[in-house]
């Protein structure tokens, strides 16, 4: 493997030195993000693969970074590092086609129903829209949560112009707004944060505990008094609702 600090180095000597230092100093950030993404992936995913993809995102961030914008490099690089890891997972294409199809069908049902009802659709309403029983619907959610990388780290397109953002970066942070989002995608971030706030209470709670409190599925289950499987279903439903919201909103 090429040295990540020297790969793609075509800048002036001064720019190259700054770029190399940025990459060296932020390699631990790649490893931290890889560890976090790895906890949410099936066991067949290799941590070193995640780090490799993350380094590519780090290199691209260093190439695109403009210090005159007043944004810290770490803040600027985080979504690109995560996005590179998710892109790598997508390219592996290890998710069964049947699971992908189920996810798309449920996502579409959420989009259609919630646009029509102007509120969050219930499990029963989604099952009815799909023409399946409630037990079949819950089984489909379980299959998706077990077999797919479906998380707030995933990049989604949120406009017809091709603007993308990670859901993770749009979850309201109690310590304040992310300056990178303010700088690059304030309007998009606002729309996405509003969509998260409109999630059913249980789903919003799971998202908060999972991503901001860093609790694991079992810990959330114990806290809420439900099974770990149900927590996984709620997490899957939250992500599918959000993806449906933005796939439908610009159509």
Image: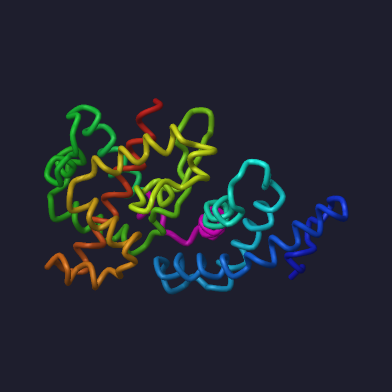
Q: Where is residue 55 in the image (x, y as percent from the top left)?
A: 64, 63
> Outermost residue, right direction?
13
Q: Is residue 90 magenta?
A: yes
Image quarter in which the C terminus is found: top left
Q: In the rendered image, which quarter is residue 117 located in? A: top left
Image quarter in which the N terminus is found: bottom right
Query: What secondary structure prevails in the magenta region?
Result: helix
Q: Is residue 51 above or below residue 167?
A: below
* Residue at x 17%, y 68% (from the top left corner): 223
Q: Where is residue 134 in the image (x, y as percent from the top left)?
A: 12, 51
Q: Does the magenta stretch include residue 46?
A: no
- Report the number of discs: 0
Q: Position of residue 230 (x, y in %)?
A: 19, 62
* Residue at x 36%, y 29% (from the top left corner): 249
Q: Where is residue 61 in the image (x, y as percent from the top left)?
A: 65, 52
| Left or right position of 154 against 22 | left
Q: Is residue 107 above or below residue 153?
A: above
Front-most of 112 and 79?
79
* Residue at x 16%, y 44% (from the top left corner): 127
| Left or right position of 182 against 5 | left
Span shown in magenta: 83-100
């Amino acid at each position: 493997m090429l040295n990540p600090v020297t790969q793609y180095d075509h800048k002036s000597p001064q720019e190259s030195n700054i770029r190399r230092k940025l990459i060296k100093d932020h390699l631990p950030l790649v490893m931290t993000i890889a560890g976090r993404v790895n906890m949410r992936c099936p066991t067949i995913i290799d941590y070193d693969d995640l780090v490799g993809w993350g380094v590519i995102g780090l290199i691209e961030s260093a190439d695109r970074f403009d210090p005159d914008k007043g944004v810290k490099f770490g803040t600027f690089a985080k979504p690109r590092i995560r996005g590179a890891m998710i892109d790598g997972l997508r390219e592996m294409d290890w998710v069964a086609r049947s699971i992908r199809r189920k996810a798309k069908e449920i996502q579409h049902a959420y989009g259609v129903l919630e646009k029509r009802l102007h509120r969050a659709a219930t499990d029963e309403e989604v099952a009815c829209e799909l023409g399946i029983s409630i037990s079949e619907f819950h089984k489909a959610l379980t299959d998706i949560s077990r077999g797919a990388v479906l998380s707030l780290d995933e990049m989604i397109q949120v406009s017809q112009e091709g603007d993308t953002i990670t859901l993770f970066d749009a979850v309201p942070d109690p310590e304040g707004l992310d300056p990178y989002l303010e700088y690059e995608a304030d309007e998009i971030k606002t729309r996405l944060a509003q969509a998260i706030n409109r999630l059913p209470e249980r789903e919003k709670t799971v998202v908060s505990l999972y991503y901001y409190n860093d609790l694991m599925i079992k810990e959330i289950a114990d806290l809420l008094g439900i099974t770990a499987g149900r927590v996984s279903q709620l997490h899957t439903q939250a992500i599918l609702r959000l993806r449906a919201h933005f796939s439908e909103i610009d159509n």
